[in-house]
Image (spheres, helix red, strand yellow):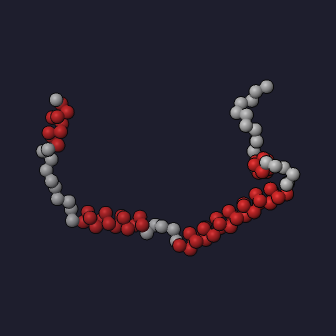
Amino acid sequence: MKENNQFDILGTIKKVNAPPYLYKKIEERINAITSEMMPKGFMLASSIAFIILLFFNMFLVTSIIRIEPSRNDNVEVIAEGMHLTISNQLYYDE
């Protein structure tokens, strides 16, 4: 009963005209946000640096695999090169 009364109060709200400068102010804020993007030159340089780094990492991983061909498990070679544990054991059991 009390909830219905609260919704009835919402029906008494009247429409109010917005100030004429409000729309222009909102547009200016939107344009200010879109103008804060990164420069294209910086984005291009970052992309090129990322691609070079990616190829360098791929070269290192493949060279590690070629150095030790006696091992059959390449995942172990990469994990040891990154100083990661290669055990599937979750807990230390003795």
Q: Residue furthest right?
A: 70
Q: Position of residue 83 (x, y in %)?
A: 77, 47
How many numbered marks, from 0 up?
Answer: 0
Residue 94 vs residue 34: left or right?
A: right
Write the residue at 53% across / 73% down: 40
Residue 90 vs residue 25: left or right?
A: right
Q: Residue furthest bottom?
A: 41
Q: Position of residue 88 (x, y in %)?
A: 73, 37
Q: Position of residue 62 (x, y in %)?
A: 77, 59
Q: Residue furthest top?
A: 94
Q: Choose between 3 and 19: the one closer to the eye.
A: 3
State whether residue 40 is above or below residue 86: below
Q: Place residue 7 in its image quadrant.
A: top left
Write the residue at 76% across / 57% down: 61
Q: In the rendered image, which quarter contains the C terminus?
A: top right
Residue 28 vs residue 75: left or right?
A: left
Q: Choose between 10 and 51: the one closer to the eye.
A: 51
Q: Position of residue 68 (x, y in %)?
A: 85, 54
Write the residue at 34% across / 67% down: 28
Write the residue at 75% across / 63% down: 59
Q: Choose between 51 and 31: the one closer to the eye.
A: 51
Q: In the rendered image, which quarter contains the N terminus?
A: top left
Q: Place residue 23 in its image quadrant.
A: bottom left
Residue 64 vs residue 31: left or right?
A: right
